[in-house]
Image (cartoon, rainbow, N blue to C red):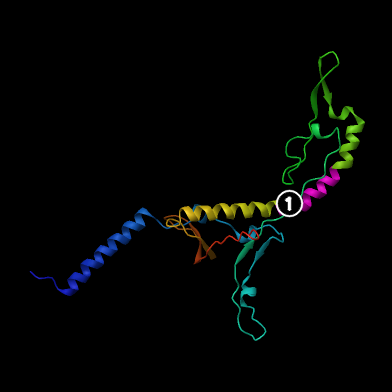
Amino acid sequence: MTTTADQARERIAQVFRYLRDLNIHRNPAKRLIQDQPWRLSLDDLPDHSSIQRVTVDTARDGDEDGQATQPTYLLKVDRPRLSKPPTPPEGLLDWLERGWDDPLAELRVRPSRNEMTAQGDAVIAAFEDSTQRVALLDGWKPRRTQWAENERPARQAMGVFEELYELRGRIDREGEAVELMIGDGLLDWPRADGKIHHPILLQRVELQFEPDGPS
């Protein structure tokens, strides 16, 4: 019994369909965006000068001759410059809890602490026992609060920079298993077999590191 060309093609098609279904079974498509190994929402990026985005309107702008110009990037994150907080007055630093120099953390003061007398006995000293300490805090705290408010976007931008830098290393190590994509058009579809909440328009992008910035 001979095999015709149509039968041969059908058998080959069956093999490819089997391999396709096997791959879908072993590697099911992600239905929920939170199930992806990594994600970053552009809408959640901090408002800081070190983060630059190319919007759709910007990408459509043309040059002086009316020709469309191609942007060189969709998202660019420079390493932001960070500043130090105002130095606490002498006599106040030992009363500040850890994190006083972190603009993302709330300023906390120890209500009391143990001190030693001249005879070596331990006594409990309350922060408010000294009107001088209270006055020092009242004078320094507003400056620290203003610094933290101004510094917070820079620290958040640094977090994005470090996250992307770490992601670049992962892509270099696992380039054959992962790829970076930008998504748009969120599909939110409750189904009997499971909810779908995932972008439907996907485009592969590259993550490049420029050491001169660094960015």
User: Is residue 38 visible to the viewer in this orientation of the structure?
Assistant: no
From the top left corner, tell me how far across and down residue 183 is, in percent.
53, 64
Is 127 or 101 nearer to us in this picture?
101
Amino acid type of the residue that numbered disc 1 sits on in the rendered structure: Leu
Residue for point 68% across, 57% down: 46
* Residue 208 appears left or right of 130: left
Q: Residue at x 44, y 55 (%)?
A: 194
Task: Decide which of 78, 179 is in the foreground and name it.
Answer: 78
Secondary structure under tag 1 reads loop
Percent x, y for residue 5? 17, 74
Residue that protrudes farthest toward the left in the picture: 1
Q: Which residue is located at x 63 percent, y 63 percent?
A: 76
Q: In which quarter of the image is residue 138?
A: top right
When asked about the image quadrant of residue 93, the answer is top right
Question: Residue 16 or 168: which is nearer the viewer?
Answer: 168
Q: Quadrant of the C terminus?
A: bottom right
Query: What are the residue bounds of the magenta stretch?
Result: 141-154
Residue projecting furthest to the front: 212
- Crowd tier of the residue under label 1, counting other residues whose Cα lies within 10 Å: few below 14, some 14–19, many 20 or above: few
Task: Kindly tell me whether residue 107 is visible in this rendering.
Answer: yes
Is residue 37 inside the magenta stretch? no
Instruction: Judge left or right: residue 127 versus residue 170.
Output: right
Residue 145 in the magenta stretch? The answer is: yes
- Which residue carries the number 1 mark? 82
Kindly report the secondary structure that dominates the magenta region of the rendered protein.
helix
Above or below, 28 relative to 87: below
Residue 154: percent from left, percent from top? 72, 54
